[in-house]
Structure formats: C-alpha cells, structure tokens
Amino acid sequence: MTEIGSPVAQAPSPSPAEASQFDTTATRKQSQVILRRFMRHKAAVFGVVLLVLLVLFAFLGGAIWKYSYTDLGFKRYLPPSLDHPFGTDRLGADMVAQLIRGTQFSLQIAVVVAVLSTIIGVVLGALAGYLKGWVDTVISRFIDLLLVIPSLVIAAVLVRNSFVVSVAGNGGRSNWMIVALYMGLIGWLSIARVIRGMVLSLREKEFVEAARALGASTFRIVFRHILPNTVDVIIVNATLAIAQAVLLEAALSFLGLGVQSPDTSLGLMISLNKNELTLHPWLFFTTFVFIVLISLAVNFIGDGLRDAFDPRQKRVKA
C-alpha cells in the first residue's frame, strides 16, 4: 500500500538506442502498410509486371533474340511471321531487334528526364516555399511564365537549336543525352509548384520551429526536416514524370526534333515509319503499342503509389 505523500514511481525514460529502435520499427510498419495497400491495387500490380517485362525486353532482349538491329540482309517490308514476329522495315531490318533498341533508348531518356526534373523541381520548390520573399516571387513567376507555353513548344525550340549546333559541329551525329537534358530542364515545373505548397505548410510546424530555435541552418531544416515529409509526393511525381517523358520524346521525335540517327527511340521509329501507315501498317502500330504500354504501366504504378501513400485521397474526374 502506498503511503500518502510518498513519491510516485515514474517509468524510466527510454534511452537513445531504444528511441531509435522504436522509430525504426514504426517506419518499418508504415512501409509494410504502404506495400499492402499497393499490392491491393490490381492495376498498379499489373503495371509493375508490365514494366518489368518491358525493361527485360529492352535490356536483355538483344542478348536473347536471334537477330541484331545491325542485320539488314532481309527482304524489305516482310509482314509479321514466325521468323519475324513484327515483320521487317524499309531497310530490311528485323522489327523486333529495332524495337528492343528503341525501347532501351526511350526508357533511358525517360529515367534521365524524371531524375533531372525531380531534382530541380524539389530543390527550387523547397527554396521558394521556405525562404518566401523575393526568392519565392522570382521562382513562382518564372514557373507561371513557362507554364503558359506548352512544354512541347519549349522543348522543340531548345532541341532544335541544339540539333543545329550538333550538325554543324560533328557531322550530323546527335546524342540522346542532349534531348534528355533539355527535356529535364523544362519538366520540373509541376513538381516545383507542388513541393512549394507543401513546404509553405510544413515550415510553420512545431518541429521546424524547434529546429530553427536550436540554430539549425536553412539547408539542414529544408533537407533534413522538411523534405523527408514530402517523400511520398516526390516518389509519385517522379514516377509519373517517366510516362510524360516517354510521350514528350515521342512527340519531339515524330516532328523530327528529337532523337536523331545513329541513336534511336520509339518516337524516332514512329517518325521514320509514319508514311508506311497505309501499305505497311504493322511498322507504325507495333511501335505505337510499345509507347502506349510504357505509358500505361508507369501511370498505373503512379496511381497505385498515390493511393498507397494517401488512401483517403479522392481522385476527381476531369
């Protein structure tokens, strides 16, 4: 029996090691919950399977398939058959081999664009939202200005000028990295606006005020305390940026302003075969289907990630 006035026993406070272990366990449980939500999203799971198959086709298909994209000794315009499932093109090249190479380049371009645009958008959006003032004004007005102009137009102007310089400087050879670089430089606008809005809200939270009171630098507050709370949005937007990059590259190459030979891409293949639509439709539609499949797979994954991170979010139909 406890005597009146005797001190009440208090539970000992957890040690730093115990607190760290608790945080790790909580993070692991949250990750497991997110994974379960994602796996319940049938379209997202289908998107993952489809994307894995496309990646394997692009990066391992060349080692497995019996023909190379350099083999040009076949009869021109052969229709689909057992030997050539997607036929042959105007040069007598096997279309399966060409699609393997084109898909590989298109995926590489899309990933480079997604990574570059995400990094730029996150950094500029975070700085605009946290610093506010003239920094926010300059970045926000610049974003508003560029959003007025369609991305395809901006990319076409940049890539066109680069292509002219490339032709003059190295005999007409082009580099797919140049196209990816310019696409990445204009693809950060949307994610920057999203991150800016989130940082504006998070900067007023108590944990940010506490870090500021302890003398943490702006860099540490933004990148150590604020941005980790936006990881879900960053992942979703980066995923969807891949699909957007595939479509933008295809549009640029279709107009003759994207990837140029000796490099290739699905967009360039469509551009080269656009005049064959009437007489040899398989040359156009097989490439078109691959572009659609990549876009669908990535968009399904993006939808699944968004629902997994925030199951309460309701999607509004346009």
Image (cartoon, grey):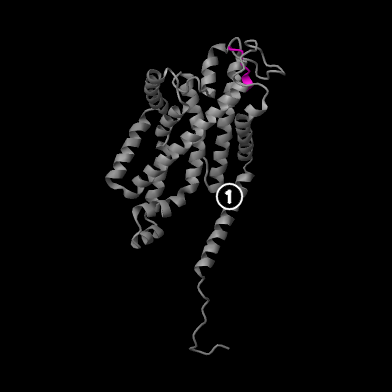
Q: Nearer the viewer, residue 6 or 271?
A: 271
In the image, the segment drawn in magenta is 90-96
Q: What residue do we see at 35% from left, 63% from top?
A: 214
Give the camera-side residue of 113 and 316.
Answer: 113
In the depicted structure, whether residue 269 falls above or below residue 112: above
Query: Is 252 positioned to the left or the right of 96 in the image?
Result: left
Residue 280 sits in which quadrant?
A: top right
Taking the spot 45% from the left edge, 20% from the top edge, the residue there is: 173
Picture layout, residue 84 above or below residue 37:
above
Q: Is residue 149 visible?
A: yes
Question: Is 36 colored magenta in this rendering?
Answer: no
| Residue 112, horizontal then vertical, whole percent | 48, 34
- How far across and down, in percent of the image, does residue 21 sit? 55, 63
In terms of image quadrants, where is residue 54? top right
Quarter-of-image position of residue 100: top right
Which SS does the magenta portion mostly show? loop
Disc 1 marks a residue whose amino acid type is Ile
Label 1: which secondary element: helix
Question: On the image, numbered disc 1 is attached to which residue?
Answer: 34
| Residue 156 coordinates in the image, percent (x, y) | 40, 23
- The residue at 52%/46% (across/down) is 313
Residue furthest left as drawn: 134
